[in-house]
Amino acid sequence: MLTFKQIKAEDVVVMRHKVLKIGQPVETCYFEGDLDEGTKHFGAFLNNELVGAVTMMLKKTNTYKVHPVYRLTGLSIEQEHQHQHIGKRLLHFAEENISRKGTVMIWCFARDYAVPFYKKSGYQLNVQEVVIPYIGSHRIMFKFVPKED
């Protein structure tokens, strides 16, 4: 049975290391903002075992004054559970959770190979390329998520 819930930063770090930062020191899996007050971490559990994680960080910005802005980061699903719609469902769960009080804007740095996934989930592509050291090329993507009624 697949379930979703809010989890601790330590659990997200383990998943990032297994999926996104293979072969790199575990220290690289701690992201600036992981422990900030507005940050929320979410996990996907298959038969009570953590198989995926994502982080939503509330960001202060002067650019967008109307909506709260979140940065989506570290979406990771264990290799053997990819292509089973777990990432899509986890992302939707996280979006619903952060939009309960109002419409939010979410943005992320999407790895080039993940751009189609985010497009299918309603994210728009900013053509600007960002190269992240030791990881590679990413694209900025964003989405407005309306308040859940």
Image (tube, rainbow, N blue to C red):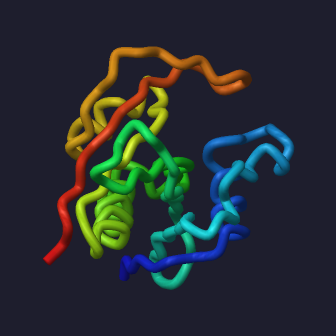
Task: Give coordinates of residue 63: x percent, y percent.
Answer: 40, 36
Task: Name which quarter of the figure residue 93 lies in.
Answer: bottom left
Location of residue 107 by image quarter: top left
Number of numbered discs visible in the structure rendering: 0
Of the 4 image quadrants, the one containing the N terminus is bottom left
Q: Is residue 89 above or below residue 126?
A: below
In the rendered view of the protein, which quadrant contains the C terminus? bottom left
Q: Which residue is drawn at 45% across and 33% down?
A: 110
Taking the spot 62% from the left edge, 48% from the top edge, the residue there is: 19
Q: Residue at x 48, y 48 (%)?
A: 71
Q: Which of 112 and 86 is in front in this view?
A: 112
| Left or right: 5, with 88 as reference point | right
Q: Is residue 31 left or right of residue 142?
A: right
Residue 69 image offset from top left, x and y in percent: 40, 51
Query: In the image, 22: left or right of 63?
Result: right
Image location (x, y in percent) of residue 2: 37, 77
Q: Residue at x 48, y 75 (%)?
A: 45
The answer to which of 43 and 147 lies nearer the viewer is: 147
The residue lying toward the viewer, choosing from 113 and 29, is: 29
Quarter-of-image position of residue 5: bottom left
25 relative to 84, above or below: above
Give the answer, above or below, for where 149 lies relative to 142.
below
Location of residue 144 in the rendering, given as x and y in whole percent from the top left corner = 24, 48
